[in-house]
Image (cartoon, helix red, strand yellow):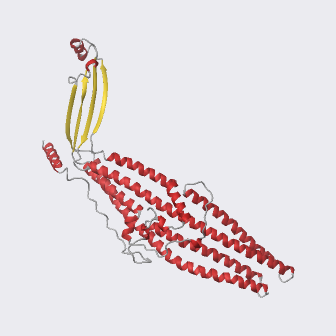
Amino acid sequence: MKRVKNIIITFGLALASVSCVSKLAYTEPELDLPETFKYTATADTASVANLEWRQFFSDPILQSLIEKGIKNNYDLQIALKQVASSQEKLKQAKYLQYPDVGFGVSAQISRPSKNSMNGQSLNLFLGQSHVEDYNAAFNLSWEADIWGKIKNQQEVSRMQYLQTYEATKAIQTQVVAAIAQGYYNLLMLDKQMQIAQSNLELSKNTLALTEKLWQSGDTTSLGVQQATAQKQSTELLITQLEQNIAIQENALSILVGENPGKISRTIEMSETSLPQEISAGLPAAMVSRRPDVRQQELVLLESNSVVGIAQANMYPSLKITANGGVNSFKIDNWFQIPASLFGSVLGGITQPIFQKRQLKTDLNVAKIQREKNVLAFRQSVLNAVGEVSDALVSNESLKVQEQKAAEQAATLKNGIKSAEMLYKGGMANYLEVITAQGNSLQAELNLASVKRQRLSSIVDLYRALGGGWK
């Protein structure tokens, strides 16, 4: 009796607090964030990531590729389908607070044994050996959301929907960055192809001059062989570049959701334009802007609601059931109103007492999962700060590298002219000319590569800061 009394008292308190209890309060985990990023170009609190991708990438061809990628990329389309699926579940969750209502129609014929009490009673009172029962009724079942369990279930559905939404934004940032990276890599390969073709003409001229000198007896056949090998090496490089260009075009085509094919472009890498002085903003603002970090925080919010559900499952629950309709043991007067009408209402309190420790285990597991998600959220923030820092370091370093590589390429290009003049005047041998040409070729190829890396570092920084989904 004492236990029953306690249950009744608990239920009374639950009803009194029904308007107050909803979900567990959420406290955002403390984050150890630096005040500013190192190597920032400016101290502005604004961030370049606030720019829409159309503002950040001004090249019309690149804009067209990104637009097609956002529209046709299959990874993005799959993510959007997942958003639509979660949206349907969210719509359904809004109805969890309403009662379940069903309608059923049934007909039953029972024939008991003639030697049974039921059989003899039927024959005595009804003059028949069977009994019929016809029923048509509405059934209603409703649980009062005393402890906020239903509100927490709705919150879980909302967090899951928002996670898919943030996941879609994260995929878009990756797609936008990948398309830009691929496009700049293609421009680099075009530049390297121009350099190789120009070097091939120099190699042909050197070979022609060496052959003339050999015919006049001013050099040996070894010089002709070395000049020929230099020309063949450049021709091999051109073939490799043609292969790499075709592969990069195919990769870009697939990224934008098209069959592998040619990618039209009308500008050179030197004509590309990206923001040079980039403001990274504040780390705290980056955390709230990055879709993947925001998604991980939503996972944490979901786990907080799951704890609330597990906790509510340990408390008493109030359920009300009702049914009503028409019932008759004869089909010909089944729907006679009001004689065939019936109805019933039942309300009950259920308090879990012994569930083999299942409810407590569920609650402890939910709390542990929430703690794991706190750690995962902090790790995602740390990773994000690290990615931004790496991109900033790379951008600053590549500025210097590009300047040094340009100076080296200019020096070695002038060295070719000097070597050719000395070679024609007999003051230098063929090896010096070939070496000068080879060194100049590598320096110009390296300069193109460094320029592409610089562009890539800017794109990486834009993505790392959370840009690209607007």
Q: Classify residue 427 as left or right of residue 330.
A: right
Out of 5 and 191, give the one closest to the viewer: 191
Looking at the picture, does residue 463 appear above or below residue 425?
Answer: above
Which residue is rendered at x = 28% and y = 60% of the image? 26
Q: In the picture, residue 218 is in which quadrant?
A: bottom right
Quarter of the image that includes the N terminus: top left
- Residue 364 visible within the image: no
* Residue 116 position within the rendered picture, expressed as x and y whole percent measured from the top left: 25, 16
Above/below status of 184 relative to 303: below
Q: Nearer the viewer, residue 459 or 32?
A: 459
Q: Quadrant of residue 434?
A: bottom right
Residue 270: quarter of image: bottom right
**Residue 330: x percent and y percent?**
26, 18
**In x, y percent, where is residue 417?**
71, 83
Q: Residue at x 53, y 57 (%)?
A: 68
Residue toward you, 253 or 145: 253
Left or right: 16 in relation to 219: left
**Position of 249 compared to 340: left or right?**
right
